[in-house]
Image (spheres, rainbow, N blue to C red):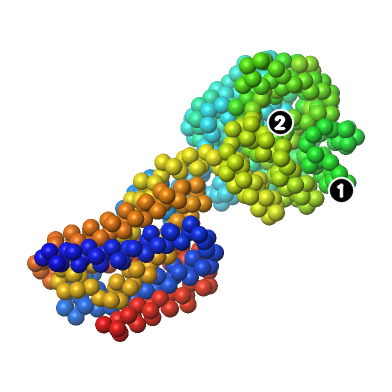
Amino acid sequence: MQTTWIYALSMGLFSACSLPLGSLITFFWTPSQRVIAFFMAFGGGALLAALTIELVAGTLQAGQFNALALGCTCGGLLFIGLNEVVNDFGAFLRKSSTRLYHLRKKEHKQFKQIIAAVQRIDIFDELSDKDLKALAASIQFHDVKKNTMLYRRNDPAEDVFIIEKGTIELIDPSGQLPSRNFTEHGAFGWMAFMSGSPYRYNAQAKSDATIWQLPRYAFLSLLPNSPTLLQAVHKEMRSTEVSQYLVEEQGLSPQRVKQWNDDAVHSLLKRGIFHDALPIQRNCDVFLQHLPCIERASFFKNLPANEINILASRLIYKTHKAGETFFVAGELADRMYFINQGTVNMLDAANNTGSSINLSAHSAFGFMAFITGMPHSMSALATSDTEVWVLRKQDFNDLIKLLPEFRKHVDHYIQHADIENYLTHQSGVDGVSINRWKRMACVAITKGLAIPSLHSMLFNVQEHKAKPLAIWLGLLLDGIPEALVIGANISVSHIGLSLLAGLFLSNFPEALSSSVDMRQHGMKGNIIMLMWCSLMLMTGIIAAMGSLLFVGLSPATLAFTEGVAAGSMLTMIAQTMLPEAYLKGGGIVGFSTLLGFLCAIFFKTLE
């Protein structure tokens, strides 16, 4: 008996020693996605063959198919259920395939919630299922933190917002209108959205909130193709609420509102489109004249004429009264500013001397935090009536996609020492994180993608530091069945060489792939290695315990037990290993699975 459990312990440790080995390799080498895919599929094929030969074939010869089938079914369902539980607690981060499945599941759940959210707006409640799904496909989901600014006064009304939970406060920065609070199931920004006028308020999260965001372009695209929506918009335009809004909150004269209303309704009924009641101010021509004189923000200088014109067309021209705040220290930067005329005071709250910087015409400000996606390190206040051009983050990201020379200028600017000095001294970011962000930013820019937010990157790393236990439990869930198989086999006879080889070969790529993914998500190498070493030890211990617990079981009970383990492992191969391999390597998966299958059979011939 003593010899049996020691033998099971040693076999369990041997089969799982490829886990820390696969993780250790990532300290010195980061394999390509195709290499990882090859190993994953090879290991999956080897394990499939080993389970078929060692467990299924042997149990069928003993005449225990019913017990085996019942055990496999229970094992597969048990794995699926437990996998769902640990994934919801963060274990989905252990593999790309589990992460993708988790995100798809979340998106499907959100899509059903979106349909219900859209119907909360009266104008949409009679739309057909087809039209609702067309709108829902474009809606974006956001979790926002307390004090997050969703939009500011005079921004283009490009979205309407629906609150799933939390409280959003609409604030008039001029103080002329009272603040308004919107809570769960409320919709805000609708009147500006519908009429095509700038937002009248600042919208700020009063608490942590979950919101749905419907883009106006999706609404306008659906309008000509949906008679129901067109009639509803027609009715809305003729309502007194729209006219009162444009007169009382946007300052238009009743005559101008009536003229717009008549023109818009005529165009709507004839062509399915209508023009905006109050177009956004851009002042592009004046900006083009001032651009050569603008101080700092060098990535806007010396661009081709066509790119400068496109850039200018994305700016918003705004007036801030004396005493109005542009942003405060600690607020996430989502826009940068160019002063046309007036004065702005930049105050460093962290400086005990109370020193400040005074900016005037032709100055750019807020751009360091804007580029890096960090919170502002200083506050900005208009000390006189000040006119500025504003570039929002979403427009900046579009410019990176559209303009090749602008893309090069931004890429070069990110490498400048000023950025590193700012992040080190003003934001307190360590050098490793700065360099990692720079690499990610340059890759994104080269591909024409949005620059990743350094703040989000740092936040995600901190968030994922709480996930190791959940990830470890998920990995243990993958490993328990193999330990039980080892223990059950040794309790009645011995473990086959093909099964041992299949387990060893499947563990190596699993650790290799998962370690690469976890390191990319900010987990430290020593924590990852500790995980795999502890899992190797747990595999040996569970195998030893299984060799003792399964002694003396009836053939049917033993077949059921082995079936539970085999069913769990086969489900794991189909649900995580092979999808992971295909996700990373595509067409290479089929042949490498075959090679692994043949490799396990070859080991069987050596017995």
Residue count near mark 1 (Cα–Cα under 10 Å), binned few <14, some 14–19, many ≥20 = few
Kind of residue at disc 1: Pro
- Quarter of the image where one finds residue 139: top right
Residue identifier under label 2: 366
Q: Quarter of the image for the C terminus: give it.
A: bottom left
List x then y, in percent, for residue 387: 80, 24
Q: Is residue 97 above or below residue 555?
A: above
Q: Quarter of the image for the N terminus: give it.
A: bottom left
Q: Nearer the viewer, residue 474 or 395?
A: 474
Kind of residue at disc 2: Gly
* Residue at figure coordinates x 39%, y 46% from the top left: 468
Res. 581 in view? yes
* Disc on the earlier residue, 2 or 1: 1
- Quarter of the image where one finds residue 256: top right
* Residue at figure coordinates x 73%, y 24% from the top left: 250
Residue identifier under label 1: 304
Q: Secondary structure at mark 1?
A: loop
List x then y, in percent, for residue 216: 66, 41
Res. 266 in view? no
Q: Are marks 2 and 1 in contact (CB under 8 Å)?
A: no
In the drawing, does residue 218 fall left or right of residue 524? right
List x then y, in percent, for residue 508: 40, 65
Q: Secondary structure at mark 2?
A: loop
* Residue at figure coordinates x 87%, y 48% from the top left: 304
Q: Nearer the viewer, residue 410 or 582?
A: 410
Q: Residue furthest right?
A: 289
Q: Residue furthest front?
A: 28
- Quarter of the image where one finds residue 555: bottom left
Task: Estimate the spatial distance between the alpha carbons at disc 2 and disc 1, rounded to whole Å.
Answer: 24 Å
In the drawing, does residue 88 fall left or right of residue 262? left
